Amino acid sequence: MFQRLLTADLVIADISVHNANVFYELGVRHALRDKRTFMIRCKGDDVPFDLATDRYFAYERDHPAADANAPDDPLAGRKKFVRALRRTIDSEDRDSPVFQLLPELEAQDQSRFLIVPPDFREEVEQAAAGDRLGDLEMLAEEVLGFEWEIEGLRVVGRQQFYLQAHEGARLTWDAVRNLNPNDIEANQLLATIYQRLGDLTRSDQAVNRVLGHRELTSRDRAEFYSLLGGNAKKEWSNDWEKGPASSLRERALRSPGMLKSYELYAQGFNEDLNRFYAGLNALAMLTVTIELAQALPDVWSERFETPEEGERELSLLKEHHRKLSASTDLSLKAAKARLKREERSDRWIEISAADLCCLTSKSPTRVANEYRNALAGAEDFYADSARRQLDIYQRLGVLAQNAQAALEVVGPTAAEEKERRRVLLFTGHMIDAPGRERPRFPAEKETVAREKIKETVAGELELADGRVCGIAGGSNGGDILFHEVCEELGIKARLFLALPREKYINASVQAAGPEWVERFNRLYNQLSNQKQVRVLAESKELPRWLREKPDYNIWQRNNLWTLHNAMAAGGENVTLIALWDREEGDGAGGTKHMVESARERGAKTIILDTGLLFGL
């Protein structure tokens, strides 16, 4: 009871009956949480003195759903109740008298008391280790509705962020923020995610949503100001990158984003001098400013009433540069000393040291050597990160010799962004079992179904200029026909099985006869050799953490699993092809469920209506 009084998003307390337990539990809630406690009472009862001044919802004793002021509507009271609950849930106002009277008191962080099941964590870790972004998206959806959902979302979202699955991470952290709009971690990561997605407005909004909160640490504030600095830097680069190359440097110097970015990064560094990243970025922007101002004095002086004012401002910036160089160097050395003491390594710190050398050294060969050592054996994305800043220097003619020497070590872009294909996701009926009362897919209609599937797949192949891949299960009937069509048309396909091979054959293949088992085995062996087979679970039983989810089974999970993997691979470029009679299935998790789930997520859907196709 105490745990739920602390962790619940909303607590409703009926104070109509003067029960000591009710008031005791209400007091516990008021002492632990500052908001979203909703008190109700029936009309006619006295309110205890200590609660007389507090807000509460009053209902009719004999007809709680009614409202005496609206006799023509028997549900008017209930409608008012729903509206009042929604206002309470959406409000950020403190309704606890304890927190109102003690404004410096901090509410408990309920996340500390929400336990995420270990087997859920293990599933997330396994999905992340295999870079299975679709699995992570499925887990983020499945966790919704559990008491610990916000912490479960957090576990998934951190892995998505680490894997740079920005769109999936955005959805997950938005779900966290919907549960707690001022969640510091959610807003911090969303600010970065929106920045990477190019939505600088939403990135700034995420920062400003929590930047003024008292519970922010200096480390948090440093991170948030750095994010704002990064957004200003992106706005600055957008200003000067567009336009003729002949005036590129002038546009860069005139853009207000240049000094704005420097000031925000510097403010972040001032908040926490251990955040060398903020200091390094402030120093980079200040270096660009000084070098451009010296190279283009007439453009620099446009900011000032007289040239003398411009010279004085430039002298001040040079003094700031000297101090910032020294403090950033100390901060970075302290970070390296901590790593050495803890016997750890950090590639980003090594790259940052090379970046600092590029900004401060007069020896291009030393700069090149620093980058060579920092990137030795590193994955491509580390070099890509370093290259982005060096490219700015080179294009603007800033630190020209150092930048050129460094770029020769870093090298060209390692790999272009992978071209996204259209993903064809198939779902459909199995061959009718002997004696089926209502036909859906009679065995003699196999050729008709194959030709229609082939026609549809060929049409999608043409629309996508041949950039197509397929995903489907391996059931007899539609699934196997789809895979055979993909093979015929030269389309790479993946086989997603809800269960291991033997159990899957028993559940979804052999009822149609030995010929279909042979066809499945050929398909399985071929795609298995190509490492294009995935298996969801070892048995029909759901994982322990998921068994409490109402009206949910392995086949529904299988549908969401294949769908999320298709969406992760294709994004908006997903087409669901459904061989379906548009009727309810024989059980939960059938074709209807897949079609509805795909439509909810905006996937293109093509229905091959078996009633019309087969003349049923």
Image (cartoon, rainbow, N blue to C red):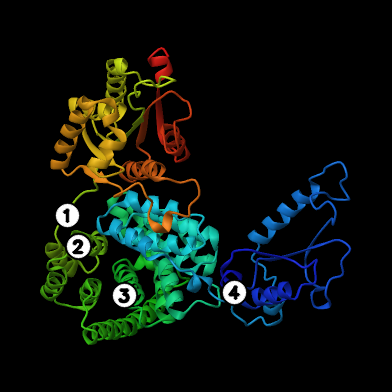
- The label number, if any, that marks residue 414 in the structure image: 1
Disc nearer the start of the sequence (2/3) = 3
Q: Mark 2 — residue?
A: 383
Judged by depth in the image, the label closer to the viewer, 4 or 3, is 4
Task: State the quadrant of the N terminus.
Answer: bottom right
Q: Mark 3 — residue?
A: 280
Disc 1 versus disc 3: distance between alpha carbons? 25 Å
Q: How many marks?
A: 4
Residue projecting furthest to the top: 615
Disc 4 versus disc 1: distance between alpha carbons? 55 Å
Q: Can you give x and y, in whole percent of width and height, for residue 43 in the image? A: 86, 61
Disc nearer the start of the sequence (1/3) = 3
Give the vertical position of 170 relative to 531 (above or below): below
Task: Please say if the residues under marks 1 and 2 sit with CB atoms less than 8 Å apart.
Answer: yes
Residue type indicated by callout 2: Ala
Disc 2 versus disc 4: distance between alpha carbons? 51 Å
Residue type indicated by callout 4: Phe
